[in-house]
Image: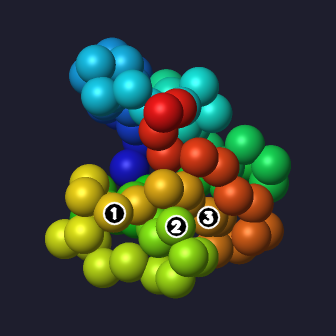
Amino acid sequence: MSNWYLRLTGQFAALVGRLDKYSDEHLSFLSSGYECPQCKKILMNWYGVSNVVALSPEGQRLPVAMVRLKATSFQCPICQHRWKFRSV
């Protein structure tokens, strides 16, 4: 996927995410075009699915269907960097 498209869709997601109280680091991740804040790798596959690991409050991996309900943080699968999902 082209980088300009990822940045455009990420900025739109970040705009909507402000209403859902996303953390500043997650908003930055989205608006950068899904780029890991630490290793700078693009974490989006060709099919438009983000390649991040969603984690529960206990640190367990969550299935995609449970992310909006139970995720508290995300993790880069490459460098293991973690960031908060919401700023509650």
Image: 13 above or below 59? above
Callout 2: SS: loop
| Amino acid at the residue labelled 3 | Gln
Question: Depth check: 35 or 56 in front?
Answer: 56
Callout 3: SS: strand
- Splitting the image into 4 quarters, where does residue 17 fall? top left
Q: Residue at image x 47%, y 81%?
A: 61
Please identify, in this view, whether the residue under mark 1 or under mark 3 is nearer the observer. Answer: 1
Between disc 1 and disc 3, whose residue precedes? Answer: 1
Q: Which residue position is annotated with label 2?
A: 57
Q: CA distance from mark 1 to mark 3?
A: 15 Å
Q: Residues within 10 Å of mark 3 (few under 14, many from 20)?
A: some
Q: Residue furthest left?
A: 65
User: Does residue 7 appear to the left or right of 68 in the view shown?
Assistant: right
Q: CA distance from mark 2 to mark 1?
A: 8 Å
User: Does residue 6 appear to the left or right of 79 in the view shown?
Assistant: left
Q: Which residue position is annotated with label 3?
A: 75
Q: Is residue 7 visible?
A: no
- Splitting the image into 4 quarters, where does residue 21 fall? top left
| Amino acid at the residue labelled 2 | Pro
Residue 51, x across and y down, in percent: 47, 67
Q: Residue at image x 38%, y 78%?
A: 62
Between disc 2 and disc 1, whose residue precedes? Answer: 2
User: Does residue 65 appear to the left or right of 49 in the view shown?
Assistant: left
Asked if marks 2 and 1 touch (Cβ < 8 Å), the reply is yes
Q: Residue at image x 78%, y 68%?
A: 79
